[in-house]
Image (spheres, rainbow, N blue to C red):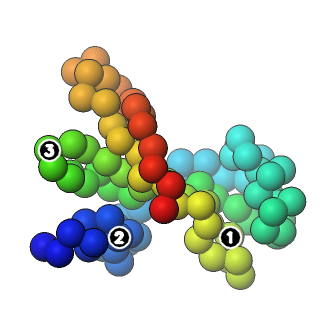
């Protein structure tokens, strides 16, 4: 696999994405509306399935709004120690 392809949000990842917050339950909803516009009820925060790069687990997080599109994609690293405790934890991020 080409190195640059590793970091792309693929069609398969989009198809398997899940909603992790909607509307007013999004912490940054006011900022999203001020920056991009749209109704708060239409905004969703999504997460990709987990993928691996060089032995480390990651997932993407982003916001979506119909008519505006996908914004603020971030790659989040998952901490191995939190998997042991049975909970997923984020330990670093990289905006793309």
**Mark 3 neighbour density, 10 Å: few (under 14) some (14–19) many (20 or more):** few
- Could you tell me if residue 86 is visible in this image? no
Callout in the foreground (2, 1) = 2
Q: Mark 1 sits on what residue?
A: 65
In x, y percent, where is residue 39?
83, 65
Q: Secondary structure at mark 3?
A: loop
Could you give the CA–CA distance between mark 2 and mark 3, rounded to whole angstroms?
A: 17 Å
Q: Which mark is residue 8?
A: 2
Q: Is residue 56 left or right of residue 41?
A: left
Q: Which mark is residue 55?
A: 3
Question: Please, which residue is most extreme toward the front here?
Answer: 3
Q: Quadrant of residue 35?
A: bottom right
Q: Residue at x 25, y 44 (%)?
A: 57
Q: Is residue 61 above or below residue 11?
A: above
In x, y percent, where is residue 38?
82, 69
Q: Secondary structure at mark 1?
A: strand
**Mark 1 neighbour density, 10 Å: few (under 14) some (14–19) many (20 or more):** some
In x, y percent, where is residue 15?
37, 71
Report the quarter where the N terminus lies: bottom left
């Amino acid at each position: 696999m080409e190195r640059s392809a590793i970091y792309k949000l693929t069609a398969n990842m989009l198809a398997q994405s899940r909603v992790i917050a909607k509307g007013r339950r999004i912490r940054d909803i006011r900022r999203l509306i001020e920056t991009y516009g749209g109704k708060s009820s239409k905004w969703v925060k999504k997460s990709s399935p987990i993928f691996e790069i060089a032995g480390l687990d990651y997932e993407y997080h982003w916001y979506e709004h119909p008519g505006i599109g996908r914004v603020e994609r971030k790659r989040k690293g998952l901490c191995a120690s939190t998997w042991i405790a049975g909970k997923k934890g984020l330990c670093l991020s990289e905006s793309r």
